Amino acid sequence: MPVSTVLLLASIGVLSLFCQWLAWRVRMPAILFLLAGGIAAGPLLGFLAPEAVFGELLFPVISLAVAIILFEGSLTLRYDEIRGHGKMVRNLIPVGSIVTCIIGTLSVRWLLDVSWPVALLFGAISIVTGPTVIAPLLRSVRPDAKLANILRWEGIIIDPVGALLAVLVFEGIVSWGQGNVFGHSLYIFGKTLMVGFLIGAIAGYLNGLVLRKHWIPQYLHNAGTLTFMLGVYALSNEMAHESGLLTVTVMGIWMANMKQVPIDSILEFKESLSVLLISALFIILAARVEFSAIAELGWGLAVVLAILMLVARPLSIFLSAIGTSLNWREKLFLSWIAPRGIVAAAVSALFAFQLQKLGYESAGTLVPLVFMLIIATVTLQSLTARPVARILKVAEPAEFGFLILGANPVARMIALALKKHEVPVTLADTNWENVRQARMDNLQTYFGNPVSEHASTHLDLTGIGNLLVISPYKHMNSLATYHFLDWFGNNSVFTLAEGDQDQKARHQTAEKIQMTRGLFGGASYAKLASLASQGYTVKTTQLSDEFSYDAFLEKYQREALVLFVFDGKGHVVPVRDMDELKPEKDWTLISLVPPQARKERKEKESPDSAANPSDEAASERSRLPLPEGEKR
């Protein structure tokens, strides 16, 4: 029974959503499930045949999708971020790219006997990793902060750089094939580069100027930029054959490095694109994979994959690490982690089709080669990265740190107290002034929404396993709570109680969020902010035989609010209810205490305190040293 085209198109969307959900549940890169879903729907079950569904529109659709992917990736390539992330990252981009490209090219050429143009293109494509596969892996493995930053920024930077190298190699192949003599081929290649860089730079400047000057309304920023980019891509291809991918890459890099251009919303738009467009693209590409083409590659395919993972990557790491402070354990861990991503799959499918039209018969091996490289690296490294990190002793200890939503004065006081006890803390806020003050206090910060797509690749959660919501932004509080409940777990998300005015039924939040409420004895954000404005400060108290918990409460006349306790084993736990708190003698308290105990304030305010002998004695006692463990 033939299946209608509408049902097939809808099935692609449903399958892509299911694969994304499954990847989220098991905390693995979505690309693995998208590839598996496409292969199952295509060659295994025969349900999806992309050529039959899309006809002649198949590769125009793929080329436009690749253009969007490259443009979005190039928007993250900021020069100042490359310069600011250490010698290892700066070395790894050029050195690692060259080493991987050369070894990949030679291994494919000699072991699989493909043509030099196809081998060169495979070598260029094989260097691309990408944040879409690195970020989920890092969340699962949690290596130490230095290694996590190296891998994260390599993935972000190598994504557009690798795509640009692949485009340049492809343009060289195409231009060479169009000329009968060396001079004409060189002219075609030069023309392609000139059109790509010139049109891309002009388009990037004009689009950035339109956004910076607000010549179009805010709600058209995403759609306007996307449609303008696609128009520039098509125009560039008309002026110089296949120069459009280079054009949109240069356009994105230019916009990313223009000053005062609001591209954050465009970057966030990538989240929807990745779910709808990129996920569907992966399923379509995987459905075109033929098992017969993979089988024809024989044992040579396994050898090529082994060379790339066990020779090219380690050699790239050890050469790039010359002159850095990395030890051998850290180098070995970096040598094992290099999963390939979406750009590699999309670019390989498009370029293989173009090369086949130019008469390169071995171009048909490019897609199965790249897809097997993706499957092998993502599967093996996702399953083994955490045990490898533990064996090499480069994994972070238990994730006992806190992501604090809010960088307001109360949040900063709490963060500073936790930091003194070497508890990893990161503050996230959308208020720049709060973030600036936190940075002046030398606190780790993230400026933006912690549940955004930008945060998924830029927010460093190394050592972080808890969420603490201390923010007045109720909508963002709810979004963050939902997001991190699924990530950290029910016992690791802590939120403040809502104000009394919000306890009516129509204002109450969902039951799932209500379960996290009731922190610090039911204090609301308004109450904490009010106490801070009255001069309350966060102090640390060490309990002992000489200074018990009852003595602590008496000291502050029960006005102190205990926020956290460190038990005898060094575990830090937020306090929900002080009435149920029974700390032991060797515990440490982090509390919000008044500027002076109530009794001391009354004594100073009383006009006849000097004439009263008992008051005078009390005043004398107040000048005595604090009990052991108490800090002023």
Image: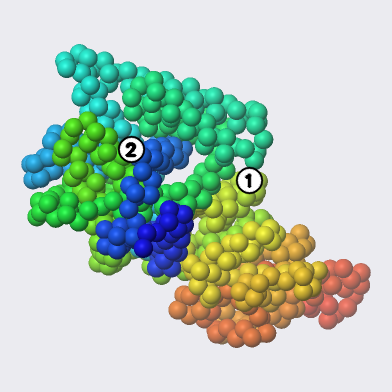
Residue pictured at 58% horizontal, 73% vertical: 574
Residue where numbered disc 2 is placed: 163
Q: Where is residue 23 drawn, in percent x and y? A: 40, 63
Is residue 255 or residue 118 the one in the foreground? Answer: 118
Of the residues under marks 1 and 2, which one precedes in the sequence?
2
Q: Rate crowding at label 1 as few (under 14), some (14 to 19) or many (20 or more) other CA atoms within 10 Å.
A: few
Point out the residue furthest to the right here: 607
Residue pictured at 33% horizontal, 44% vertical: 346
Q: Where is residue 546 drawn, in percent x and y? A: 59, 83
Q: In terms of secondary structure, where does tag 2 sit?
A: helix
Quadrant position of residue 78:
top left
Q: Is residue 301 left or right of residue 611?
A: left
Q: Rate crowding at label 2 as few (under 14), some (14 to 19) or many (20 or more) other CA atoms within 10 Å.
A: many
Q: Where is residue 416 drawn, in percent x and y? A: 57, 59
Q: Where is residue 389 drawn, in percent x and y? A: 29, 63
Q: Which mark is residue 432?
A: 1
Disc 1 or disc 2, which is closer to the eye? 2
What's the amino acid at mark 1? Trp
